[in-house]
Amino acid sequence: MRSTTPCGAGSGKLSRCSARRCRARRTASSRWISNRRAHKVRQTEERLRAGTTWHDHKLVFATEIGTPVSATNLLKRSFKPTLVKAGIARPVRFHDLRHSSATLLLTMGQPLTVVAAILGYSTTRVTERYAAVVPELFQEAAAAMDRALLGHGVQ
């Protein structure tokens, strides 16, 4: 699989990701796997429709003729219309999805080390900033400390 990030981060160039550089091996949910398989079927249909005009760059996300999707087109044709359809009126940057994912996972009680690994970080240092914006985590930690010190029946 090819990627423009993190191996080609900021360069806009395609490059092969080595497992060491990208830490590309991840555990995926069954729903994600199902969606990916369906996407692959749709992409195969697009490739067949395109015929000889298809450019096989082995991309997961490509245009209807197999070329890389430009960031501008992704934002204008997919991301912003999806925000409108979802009823989100305030400005949202594409990168905000990364922050939201980290914050949601931490709020749901996922360990900082797991969230850091999902985001592709080798340490929790950068991920710690997401934990700082989740006051519920502090409240839960205080309640857990009360239970530990005062007994399991204290809420």
Image (spheres, rainbow, N blue to C red):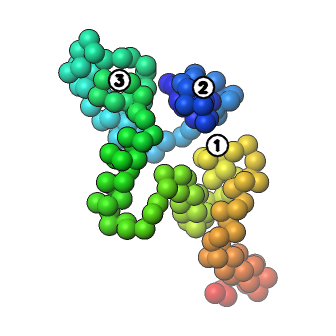
Where residue 34 sits, quadrant-wise, is top left
Where residue 37 sits, quadrant-wise, is top left
* Residue 115 horizontal/vertical position (percent): 63, 53
Residue 44, visible in the rendered structure: no
Residue at image location 20% in from the left, 21% down from the top: 49
Q: Give the distance between the C-alpha atoms of the residues marked 1 and 2, in whole angstroms.
A: 13 Å
Sequence order check, earlier mark of 2 and 3 = 2
Residue placed farthest to the left in the image? 49
Which quarter of the rendering shows the C terminus?
Answer: bottom right
Q: Which mark is residue 120?
A: 1
139 vs 4, nearest the viewer: 4
Assign a secondary structure to mark 2: loop
Q: Are marks 1 and 3 in contact (CB under 8 Å)?
A: no
Where residue 136 sits, quadrant-wise, is bottom right
Q: Amino acid at mark 2?
A: Cys
Residue at image location 57% in from the left, 58% down from the top: 99
Q: Which mark is residue 66?
A: 3
Q: Is residue 13 above or below residue 101?
A: above
Q: Amino acid at mark 1?
A: Gly
Q: Give the distance between the C-alpha atoms of the residues marked 2 and 3, in whole angstroms.
A: 19 Å
Residue at image location 55% in from the left, 31% down from the top: 12
| Residue labelled with disc 2 | 17
Sequence order check, earlier mark of 1 and 2 = 2
